[in-house]
């Protein structure tokens, strides 16, 4: 649909931050390196922490394959580019306000760099 509409499409890998010392107790005590806020959630709502990170890594590893057939699309490895600091994350996969700003800066820059497409092709 994006190609038919002449729209650029940017697929991003998933940025996440699971501290090596993560534990549910430390999460609830707010002693982890996260910028805790109202939307912070424990990793366990998605599964065991080691499985959550394995799943995200697996999805990220295959991202380029999904995007490759589309000329109007690009894949950007946000996971590799995004800072792995708790000040950017409210939890394992949600951004803090500082992270939201960084996400916007990175993605807008990448969108602006995508080549124009011709929907007639």
Image (cartoon, rainbow, N blue to C red):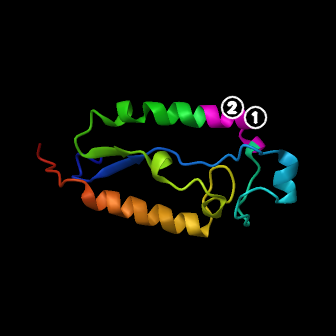
Against 21, residue 100 (above or below) is: below
Q: Quadrant of the N terminus?
A: top left
Tell me if 105 is positioned left or right of 44 in this view: left
Residue 52 point in image, percent of width and height:
67, 36
At horizontal 55% and vertical 34% (from top left) the residue drawn is 57
Q: Residues within 10 Å of mark 2 (few under 14, many from 20)?
A: few
Against 112, residue 53 (above or below) is: above
Residue farthest left in this picture: 120
At horizontal 33% and vertical 57% (from top left) the residue drawn is 110
Element carrying mark 1: loop
The residue segment tinted magenta is 44-54
Q: Which mark is residue 51?
A: 2
Tell me if 59 is positioned left or right of 22 in this view: left
Residue 117 point in image, percent of width and height:
17, 51
| Frontmost residue, 57 versus 10 | 57
Quarter of image, res 45: top right
At horizontal 24% and vertical 46% (from top left) the residue drawn is 72
Question: Which residue has dot 1 on it?
Answer: 48
C-alpha separation, residue under disc 2 versus residue under disc 1: 5 Å
Residue 109 point in image, percent of width and height:
34, 62
| Frontmost residue, 6 versus 92 | 92
- Contact between marks 2 and 1 (CB within 8 A): the answer is yes
């Amino acid at each position: 649909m994006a190609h038919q509409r002449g729209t650029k499409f940017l697929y991003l890998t998933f940025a996440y931050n699971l501290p090596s010392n993560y534990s549910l107790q430390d999460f609830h005590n707010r002693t982890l390196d996260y910028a805790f806020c109202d939307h912070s959630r424990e990793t366990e709502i998605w599964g065991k922490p080691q499985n959550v990170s394995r799943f995200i890594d697996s999805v990220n590893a295959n991202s380029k394959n999904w995007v490759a057939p589309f000329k109007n699309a690009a894949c950007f490895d946000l996971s590799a580019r995004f800072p792995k600091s708790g000040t950017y994350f409210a939890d394992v996969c949600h951004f803090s306000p500082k992270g939201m700003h960084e996400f916007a800066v990175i993605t807008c820059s990448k969108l602006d760099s995508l080549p124009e497409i011709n929907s007639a092709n």
